[in-house]
Image (cartoon, rainbow, N blue to C red):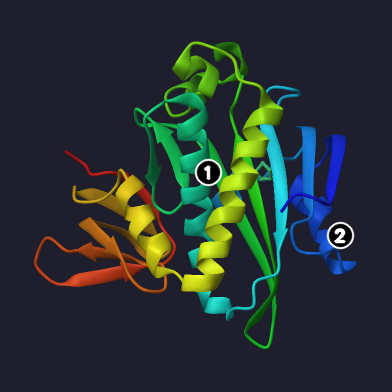
Amino acid sequence: LGRHLLLKAVVASTQNEIRQLAEEGAPEGTLVIAEQQEKGRGRMGRSWLSPPGKGVYMSLLLRPDVPLPLAPQLTLMSAVALCRALTRVTGLAIGIKWPNDLLVEGRKISGILLESAAEDERIRYVVVGLGIAVNLDEADYSEELRARAVSLKMAAGRAFDRAALIGEVLLEFERLYAVYKEQGFEPIRTLWEANAVTLNKTVTLHTAQGPFDGIPRELDASGGLRVELPGGGWRTVYSAEVGDAAP
Ligand code: BTN
């Protein structure tokens, strides 16, 4: 992965760049990295802070031969790969918040945006967008973001070499993707659960149908989150935002 590499100074979003390449037939493993994004995108229609030279903004093209409903598995795999690579490089205690945010002491250091194109319910390609707040400083964040986000540099008290970090992330990605292709989701599921920080405590899940409280316990075989409800019973969610439960 990452052997077809495009380095860009400024783009709107690396996701757009790679989607165009994908449509033109670019091979699996094609990678676009930008120094800066003017319209970095986050999940749920949010924007992604992308100041020049301080973060890693990259999009990776995968062409897995799996049915569309299994796309969430790739999201979770991406989170595990990123978590393991960043933990190894920084030594920080990094945990995964469902589905794929990485947190240090409750604050977000990286996010993943997975976008897929499908035909006849099969995935044509998947674009994995990775945003890592590497060397951002306090002043790069708005007051509002500062409470919820932090950079690796701020958390570890030292700056990191972005190229080395990208190398580690790609290596780990390659390893896990091979495991996924050979053995399926089960080993990924185990690794995800082992690195998760949002399991086994009461949270509020904000879904398109409204919020509800529950205790996430595990992933199901397709990558959904199985949540135990206060009144007994279970609910599985595939898309939601996990927040602290109201006290
Ligand atoms: C999130 O947590 O909301 C996901 C953030 C994903 C950000 C990355 S940066 C590289 C790629 N290009 C984008 O526009 N977004 C993703």
Question: Which residue is at 59% across, 51% downward?
Answer: 173
**Residue 121: image tag:** none
Alpha-carbon distance for marks 2 and 1?
A: 23 Å
Q: Determine if the C-beta at disc 1 is less than 8 A from ligand 1.
A: no
Vertical arrangement, residue 101 with respect to residue 121, above or below: above
Residue type at the position of mark 2 = Leu
Question: Which residue is at 31% across, 70% downward?
Answer: 236
Q: Quadrant of residue 25?
A: bottom right
Q: Determine if the C-beta at disc 2 is less than 8 A from ligand 1.
A: no
Vertical arrangement, residue 129 with respect to residue 143, above or below: below
- Of 155 and 245, the residue lying toward us: 155
- Of 143 and 180, the residue lying toward us: 180
Question: Which residue is at 49% across, 66% downward?
Answer: 73
Label 2 vs 1, first from the N-terminus:
2
Image position of 82 (left or right of 34) = left
- The residue labelled by disc 2 is 21
Q: Residue furthest right?
A: 24
- The residue labelled by disc 1 is 82
Question: Which percent across, then down, holds residue 205?
Answer: 32, 55
Local secondary structure at mark 2: helix
Quadrant for the N terminus, please.
Answer: bottom right
Q: How busy is the neighbourhood of tag 1: few (under 14 within 10 Å), some, or many (20 plus)?
A: many
Does residue 42 appear anywhere in the picture?
no
Image position of 110 (left or right of 164) = left
Image position of 141 (left or right of 186) = right
Q: Quadrant of residue 107?
A: top left
Quadrant for the C terminus, please.
Answer: top left
Question: Which percent across, then down, holds residue 231?
Answer: 9, 65
Question: Which percent across, then down, holds residue 106?
Answer: 35, 31
